[in-house]
Image (cartoon, rainbow, N blue to C red):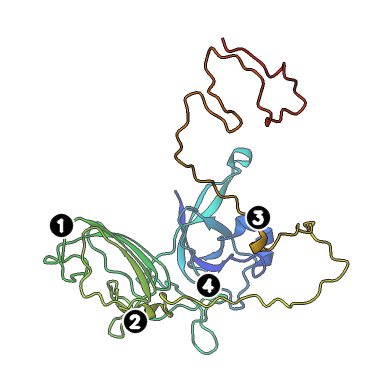
Amino acid sequence: MITTVARVQKVITDKELHKKYYNIYGQEDSIGGILFSKIDNPTSPDGNTDNLPFARPLYKHMLRYPIPGEIVNIVNLPGSNYNEEGKNILFYLPSISLQGIPSSNDLPDILNEDGIFPSLTEYFDPPIGVNALLPYEGDSIIEGRFGQSIRFSSTVDNAKVSNPNKWSNEGPIGNPITIIKNGQAFDPEKNNGDHILEDINNDNSSIYMCSNQQISNFIPASFYDESYGQDIFKESKKDEPNIANDIMNEDIKEDVVLKTPSNIPAEELQVINEPIPIKETEYAANDIAETEEQLIGSNDTLGALPSNYNSGNISQAELTQTFV
């Protein structure tokens, strides 16, 4: 693999800000690409980058885009159209950490009229006081330019290191821990090249995912719910809708057809059907009805009914029967 050491002159990040290069180098495929010059070629004083070569990032799964002025390695490798065209294209590797800090590692090579190295960036301004994290054996660390970081670490032997940390005072050595930090506490006593540790009490914000560790000297922001900015135990007031009690227009149609309800009598006029209590009465085995003045046996023949029995339209013959 043949590599070329180059200085980044422009990074394509926006289809409007870098419209010309965006359209020339494949539009969305151009995003993240760079225009570069060889390390020994001076930067154009007028900032003209039209005739510079173009290179794409070698890895897309994990990117650290360079800034203008940083030094990268360029490699010539097969591209997506290699089978059709048989040609290689240019890729770049992550920028070289010349200054040893995560925020910026540019190496400008041209002075302006005031004797100052001008910035080649569009709007990026390197933050001040961002230091690299101190590693421990076996650590994997990802750092951003603005004080963000992710550390994949473990409980270490604080007795054997010159910089003990706050998460290794409890638990067996080797227990995993993941620390995500967003923003770094500024320490005026640290130089740019000094390495630092995360500070749970002074970093802007952080997440510690522990496994049997104890974070020493941790100071909570507050022990009260007021630290959230409001009383979480107090019910919030709900605004009731203010609906005017106006008469609807005649042209408004109801979704539901309403029917006039039937008249219900007053409560004192309503009859409530209550169950009639059963009285304990002795009855004959063959049932003596009020209209009968005789006992009816299994061998008896019904004769004439009493004169006080109202039979309606049924004849005397139809009412006479013999019990068998």
The CA span between labels 2 and 4 is 36 Å
Residue on which disc 1 sits? 172
Query: Residue 265: where, in percent of width, then height?
Result: 71, 60
Q: Verify CB contact (< 8 Å) between mark 3 and mark 2.
A: no
- Judging from the image, what secondary structure is the residue with disc 2 in? loop
Q: Residue furthest top?
A: 324
129, above or below 287, in the image = below
Circles 2 and 1: CB atoms closer than 8 Å? no
Q: Mark 2 = which residue?
A: 186
* Nearer-N-terminus badge (1/3): 3
How far is disc 3 from disc 2 in space, using C-alphas? 42 Å
Q: Quadrant of residue 177?
A: bottom left
Q: Mark 2 or mark 4: which is in front?
A: 2
Q: Earlier in the sequence, mark 2 or mark 1?
A: 1
Whole-angstrom CA distance, mark 3 to mark 4, is 28 Å
| Residue 136, picture quadrant | bottom left
Marking on residue 26: 3
Residue 42: which numbered mark, if any? 4
- The mark nearer the N terminus, 2 or 4, is 4
For label 4, the SS is: loop
Query: Which residue sits at x=66%, y=24%?
Result: 305
Mark 3 and mark 2 lie on one chain; the one further toward the N terminus is: 3
230, 145: nearer the viewer: 230
Label 3 amino acid? Gly
- Find out whether the residues at labels 3 and 4 contact each other: C-beta distance under 8 Å: no
Residue found at the far bottom of this picture = 114
101 relative position to 12: left or right: left
Q: Nearer the viewer, residue 170 or 302?
A: 302
Residue occupying image coordinates x 44% and y 39%: 280
